[in-house]
């Protein structure tokens, strides 16, 4: 019976009692290679996925649960961002160090900004009306919201992986696995104001914040653990085992859970207890290499990009 359940889950068939239930699967014919980051435009319910290995950005209509269009001609697209204040989609291309802006009606290019070597993650800084891009051997680039100029840079000790911005404050928290720490950046001073060493855990790639309770969740690959740190001091609060090769994780504040997508071929759900301790409550098989995901809290849906089969799986969290 257990073997049957595992086979059904790996094939994308939901099993009763799981915290994430598969709702739909959207096939992506003609797309090959691995995926990278996501962005959602909440008002129109459109989702953008960087298909890094295919050199395209794939657009989805979430209301219709279908593929909308494809933006071709990219160079290893990594980060994507729907700019909330503009009808624009920004795409960070790691292959040629560009950030390209596209209007969101026909997705025609409007701007192309160069000199952003190894452009990767992209975040919207709502407080200052800027875009933040992780780049190169170690920096955050501050980019105008229309993607036409670089406004400043913050030097880091090595290449930044996932980073998160406070919604009401001025700090950014940056995973810097090459330096084995988390860098805390003041976005107004454009300076690193603290570093939090990760002595027991290495290869810290994904990150998510729980600002209400003052926590930052960090996914590490060596060993494969989810680590919780205090958002003020950087003190380690708790940690627990997760699947190998994690690349994305998201905090679900409504249910006090963390969803972790792991390239080993699992989707882990971690319960965050009132005292901050962590407990893995599900280890759902997916497919090897399916490590890129996105949780949209306003839409209450979790999206998983699956390479090989080239599909987007849409999950509904259970109460």
Image: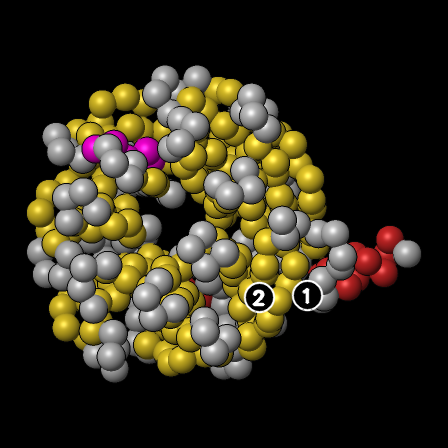
Above or below, 192 relative to 99: above
Residue at 54% of width from left, 38% of height from top?
Answer: 256
The image quarter in which residue 274 lies: top right
Residue 93 appears at what percent x and percent y?
Answer: 29, 61
Main secondary structure along the magenta-highlighted residues: strand
**Dot 1 alpha-carbon crowd within 10 angstroms: few under 14, some 14 to 19, many 20 or more:** many
- Where does the N terminus fall, quadrant-wise? bottom right
Residue where numbered disc 1 is placed? 12
Residue at 15% of width from left, 66% of height from top?
Answer: 112
Task: Pick whichever, 164 or 148, lies toward us.
Answer: 164
Residue 306 appears at what percent x and percent y?
Answer: 57, 64
- Residue 126 visible at all: yes
Is the C-beta separation of discs 1 and 2 under 8 Å? yes
Q: Which residues are magenta?
A: 170-174
Above or below, 137 relative to 276: below
Badge number at residue 157: none
Residue at 28% of width from left, 62% of height from top?
Answer: 82
Label located before the other in sequence (1 or 2): 1
Q: Element at badge 1?
A: loop
The image quarter in which residue 212 lies: top left
**Dot 2 alpha-carbon crowd within 10 angstroms: few under 14, some 14 to 19, many 20 or more:** some
Q: CA distance from mark 1 to mark 2?
A: 8 Å
Residue 172 part of the magenta segment? yes
Q: Element at badge 2?
A: strand
Q: Is residue 286 left or right of residue 56?
A: right
Above or below, 310 relative to 123: below
């Amino acid at each position: 019976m257990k073997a049957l359940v595992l086979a059904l889950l790996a094939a994308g068939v939901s099993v009763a009692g799981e915290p994430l239930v598969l709702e739909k699967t959207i096939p992506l014919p003609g797309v090959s290679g691995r995926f990278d980051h996501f962005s959602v435009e909440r008002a129109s319910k459109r989702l953008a996925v960087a298909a890094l290995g295919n050199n395209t950005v794939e657009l989805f209509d979430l209301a219709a649960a279908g593929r909308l269009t494809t933006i071709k001609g990219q160079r290893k697209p990594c980060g994507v961002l729907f700019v909330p204040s503009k009808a624009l989609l920004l795409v960070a291309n790691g292959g040629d160090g560009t950030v390209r802006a596209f209007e969101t009606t026909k997705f025609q290019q409007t701007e192309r900004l160069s000199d952003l070597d190894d452009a990767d993650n992209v975040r919207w800084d709502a407080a200052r009306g800027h875009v933040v891009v992780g780049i190169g051997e170690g920096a955050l680039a501050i980019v105008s919201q229309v993607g036409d100029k670089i406004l400043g840079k913050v030097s880091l000790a090595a290449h930044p992986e996932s980073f998160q911005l406070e919604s009401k404050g001025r700090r950014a928290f940056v995973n810097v696995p090459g330096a084995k720490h988390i860098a805390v950046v003041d976005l107004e001073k454009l300076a690193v104001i603290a570093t939090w060493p990760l002595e027991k855990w290495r290869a810290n790639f994904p990150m998510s914040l729980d600002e209400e309770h003052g926590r930052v969740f960090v996914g590490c690959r060596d060993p494969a653990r989810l680590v919780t740190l205090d958002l003020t001091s950087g003190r380690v609060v708790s940690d627990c085992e997760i699947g190998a090769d994690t690349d994305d994780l998201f905090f679900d504040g409504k249910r006090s859970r963390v969803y972790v997508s792991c390239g080993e071929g699992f989707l882990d759900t971690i319960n965050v207890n009132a005292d901050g301790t962590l407990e893995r409550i599900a280890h759902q098989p997916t497919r090897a290499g399916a490590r890129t995901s996105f949780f949209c809290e306003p839409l209450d849906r979790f999206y998983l990009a699956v390479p090989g089969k080239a599909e987007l799986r849409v999950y509904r969290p259970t109460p």
